[in-house]
Amino acid sequence: MEVRHPKVQNKRTGPGRPANPGGFLDGHACKGVTCSAAHSVDFPVSVVLPAGGTGERTGLQTPKQFCSVLGRPLISYTIQAFERVPWIQRIVVAVAKESTDLMADIIRRFRHQKVQVVSGGSTRHRSICNGVMALGEDGEGMAPDGPGVVIIHDAVRPFVEEEFLQKIATAAREHGAAGAIRPLVSTVIATTSEGFLDHSLERAKYRASEMPQGFSYDVIRQAYQRCSETDFEFGTECLHLALQYCGTNAKLIEGPPTLWKVTYRKDLAAAESVIKESLSESALVITGGRASAAALAEALQKAAGALQMGLDLVPDVTAENSRYLQTESNFIQVSINDPCLSEVEALIQALEEANPAPLHPLVVIWMRVVGEDEASDSGMVAPASALVDMASAAKLHQILLYGIQIHQSKDSERRDRSVTRAAQIVRVLIRERSPALVGQLLQA
């Protein structure tokens, strides 16, 4: 018996920080809203990510692009956002010389495929220039042809989506340059030398320049070949260089609110929240093919839907269902009146074999359903102890194992309340991915 339930889109947003920027975490082709033929382009596109900054504004010793978010450097999420786009061919990352080995390790650990690392410069424009020039080389000198379009993006803006990248690339191809803009949030004012108000700008007439920006390769290469040392040292706006040195007036496209940049320490927490929210949108419930487990799973599915979380129900993860082992991040194994963890152990082993180096921690929840006469404390000791031991071993493989025990009451109202509480616990465990609760058998 297999019951399918459509994934529930999470529409909740925070102030200026959308909860879900789409399928940016999806590293597998054609899962989610990306990989649509409507977003494809038929010309070569490459990307330059300047990542040589020191991150002074975060107040942290580690540059923000290398700060860990759920055990993974922020820059790795940004790279993945571009790698999942099939029509992007190369990604050049410009890093400080002292960060070259670190970047190479990130590429290896998180299995990035399209990335080339080059040395960055002392300023943002110098780093971008090094990346742009590297695109015109094939390892033995100048390549016969550079990419048709180059997209320049910040390494600390991880939530860019394929649909908007397609708009930027297409506009850059047509006009020579294109850039993302967003409405101004605050009014811009000018001050006198004494610190008093001089004048203010009419906010409706102005926009904030954002990333990504796209350019014909010839335009951006010539702009950097012709620009001055002052531009290299103090400039930040690539679109301005294209206009000033190549006469190319950029097409401006209003971007989505997901283009925000991690600038301050609080933005790292916001980025983690967005990633957690995206990871918690769905889960797979494994019933073992038992009718009683399937009935509970259907009730859990309904309760989770009310919490903006979609559940897929399957009897096992073999044959065609084995694809979930690589495409899903959250798993719920339902056991009816069974203190044995053999099914969970088999699931964890299958995950380790199918996904030996997950990009982020996976969650496995053992949902044990017991009758009212089996809910005594003495009946919980053995499974709880075994759960702790198994969770400790699974954690070494980036798998977070939790337990939920449901008391299956004959009273329908009590039973419904237990299922609702279980869904709420599932939502919190999956969203927070807390190492502190690993191995715990929680009561619903």
Image (cartoon, grey):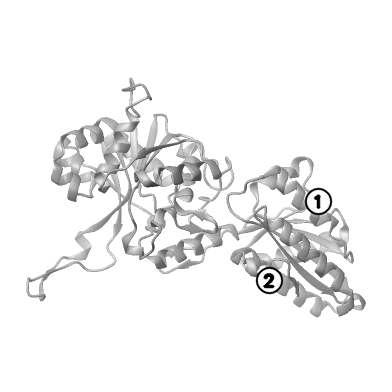
Asked whether the beta carbons under mark 2 and mark 1 sit within 8 Å of each other, the answer is no
Residue 334 in the image: x percent, y percent?
80, 61
Q: Residue furthest right?
A: 373
Residue type at the position of mark 1: Ala
Q: Residue at x 60, y 65 (%)?
A: 431
51 or 210: nearer the viewer = 51
Specify the amino acid type for callout 2.
Ile
* 78 vs 99, nearest the viewer: 99
Spatial CA span between label 2 and label 1: 23 Å
Q: Which residue shows up at 37% across the image and 57% down it?
A: 261
- Look at mark 2 in the image and give the residue it sits on: 425
Give left or right: position of 249 versus 370. Answer: left
Of residues 57 and 239, the one drawn nearer to the viewer in this rendering: 57
Figure check: 87 above or below 200: above
Picture disc at residue 82 = none
Tag 1 residue: 346
Q: Earlier in the sequence, mark 2 or mark 1?
A: 1
Location of the C terminus (image quadrant)? bottom right
- Local secondary structure at mark 1: helix
Can the viewer see residue 237?
yes
Q: Position of residue 148 (x, y in %)?
A: 34, 29
Residue 185: x, y in percent?
Answer: 29, 66
**Position of 78 relative to 87 (above/below):** below
The residue most toward the left is: 193
- Can residue 287 be seen in this snapshot? no
Q: Residues within 10 Å of mark 1 (few under 14, many from 20)?
A: few
Q: Nearer the viewer, mark 2 or mark 1?
A: 1
- Residue 13 image position (x, y, % from top left): 47, 66
Q: Disc 2 on helix, strand or loop?
A: helix
Q: Residue furthest front?
A: 98
Crowd tier of the residue under label 2, counting other residues whose Cα lies within 10 Å: few below 14, some 14–19, many 20 or above: some
